[in-house]
Image: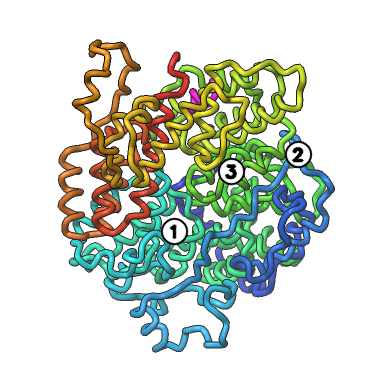
Amino acid sequence: MKPLFNSRMTVRTRLSKAGMAAFCVASFLLPAMGHPAAAQGREDAPVNLLQLGQTAPKTADSSADSAVAPDSTAASDKTPGSDAANAGEIFVLPDIQPEEASPLTRTDTQNAAAEEQGELPANDGTPALVRTRNDLPATSLARRSVSRVSLASVGLKRAATLSEDLNALIWSDSDAETALYLLRNVPAMGSAPILSQLTFEIMAIAAVPPKGAGSVAEELVSTRLNWLAKAGQSDALAEIVRMLPEEDRWAEWKRWQVEYDLIRQADDTACRDAEKKAQLTLDDFWHQSRIICALLAGDKNNARFAADILKASGGEDVNFFQLVDKLLGSEAEISLDLATLDSVDLVLMDAAHEQISLAAFEQMPSSMIQAASNFRYLAADAALKTSFMMLERGLQKREPIEQIWRSLLEAPMPAEAALATLDGQDAFGQTAARHDALVSASLWVGLALRKEADTNILIRRAFETEIRSGRPELLLDLYASLIQQRLGQTADSETAPAIDAEVQKDFALMLSLSAPSDELPVAVSAGSELGKSAKNVLAAAKGQSWQAEDLKMANAWPLLPVLEAQGSVGLQQDWTAMLTNTAPDLFTPRPVKPAYHRLSATHLLALGQLAEKGNIAETALLAAMLVQPVALGWIEPVDAAEIIKSLQQVGLQSVADQLAEDIVKAHLLRANFALAS
């Protein structure tokens, strides 16, 4: 399948010289779109599944540019009284809001530069965190050309969530060469969500550049932008791109910014930027953007005139002109070439109420994942895959994702077909070898809709498959919810057969690891001892004492280095005295110890040195670089313990605690789940 549009953005075909003069005239006749673009195409939105019987509509202060997309709340007033959608229907992803407000901010150097030119926003008493995007400057670097040091420090100013030490001085003791190596090589995704969050905070923060950054300032910024793009952190990426100077080096990112704003329905911002650019260039993209702005503002005459001029001047985007004609009232049947669709075309499809199929959507670059949640006419399978990608990248929590999945009345493929697709696939502990997200999501939805007697066995088999794929920690809570659903159905049925004892043990393990504070249901009592031991091992990962009986029951002896790194010690016992009460058979067959991946010894030694020096940013990025390519349950516990101790040493205790918990869960699942297989 050919790309929707390249992740490496390309420049549109320029107009022919013959049409240049005519188009220049047209570009000045088309008025600037400085008013909210809400009249055409963005009304009558379909049902937002997360607004059904839930929260109040978002206010003007709830997100950037909400004031220029009033139809997003109006749509909820037209919502039919249904809480489910067919797989073939079009429905909308949740209206994603950042966990914290992320205003467009400046470094002190940039503030000084802007103040000289009088471009700082007025001090009107409005808190910075609640200003809409229209209250904020379009860029944070006021001059067209800025110093390299100022450029290298660009980023977001906001309170750290993982450690107070993640501040503007995280690079102060680092050299630019080492920093650039780590920034280039740390994965954008991987096995540890907490390390992804840590890496994001380092990538996005406004900080004093490392030593010697002047000669590589642009590379430092570009590398951070590329990481944010691959990680799907569209919102933070957009804020930082908006701060970049108006220079050729950043031209493609500025174009990306307008695409992002159009998809995000921040029409005022996008149209203001497009208007400026269209008066300076003949690049098709900027003039197509102006036409879109005219359509969204309801100015059909100017939109039609500009489209005619663009077509006569050599514009060749057939998809674009078909969609423009439809928005102008044409009733002609359209036939889009999915292989050549790009982001501008998708914006028009959404405005024209054309369903965006998975085939059209699946090549959307990861840099637009957060923005893409604003498309209102996604096909169900496209929305399902997008929601999984957001979950996988930590862009959305599990609860709203589960609500979307449970809203479907039909899965894109039956549970049996999805399971057959995954059967036999094995990532062998490598996160890069994970299987397709849509199949995993479809499998879960199919199981949630299934009520046959063999569903328990299929749930067990499905999660076993996910363990092999390297995603067990990501999907643990979702599958625990499925188990609770099944147990509720069994309790309500007088004819439901008893759950197999081996299945009970696996269910008990999953429920214990998902919600350690909850009591296990009676229906899985055959797994109560294993569940109790698993909970005790988890408690030891938080510093409580470990007990030999629990480590033996849960096959957790290999985890002892991780528990000790977390400060856990065993109860005082006379082990020698116990020998007289121990069977002399020293070679009793036991479950085979799982094979582990050893992490690079050289990198682990470097990690220890960085941690000893207190270099927090370098330690964090190198830890992520080591861990993320390997499924957590496959990491040699001795190596995992070294990672945890290094994070502790630089003050990242909360990160170390969460990583240790995730590693313990992953190991217990891999060592105990469906051992017979």
Disc 2 vs disc 3: Cβ atoms closer than 8 Å?
no
Q: Which residues are magenta?
A: 461-466
- Which residue is rendered at x = 35% and y = 17% of the image? 591
Please name the amino acid that badge 2 sits on.
Ala
Instruction: Report the label total.
Output: 3
Name which residue lies at 53% across and 57% down.
16
Q: Position of residue 489 (x, y in %)?
A: 72, 28
Q: CA distance from mark 3 to mark 1?
A: 27 Å
Predominant secondary structure, magenta span: helix
Residue bearing mark 1 = 252
Q: 515 or 355: which is nearer to us? A: 515
Circle 2 sits on which residue?
85
Amino acid at the residue labelled 1:
Glu
- Element assignment for label 3: helix
Vertical placement of 271 versus 202: above or below?
A: below
- Determine whether 454 is above or below 331 in the image: above
Comes first in the chain, label 1 or label 2: 2
Element assignment for label 1: helix
According to the picture, the residue beneath numbered tag 3 turns out to be: 387
- Which quarter of the image is occupied by the C terminus? top left
Residue 306 found in image quarter? bottom right
Q: Are marks 3 and 1 in contact (CB under 8 Å)?
A: no
Q: Is residue 372 above or below residue 421?
A: below
Expressed as whole percent of the image width and height from the top left, the position of residue 353 reads 74, 49
Q: Secondary structure at mark 2?
A: loop
Kind of residue at badge 3:
Ser
Q: Position of residue 504 (x, y in %)?
A: 56, 22
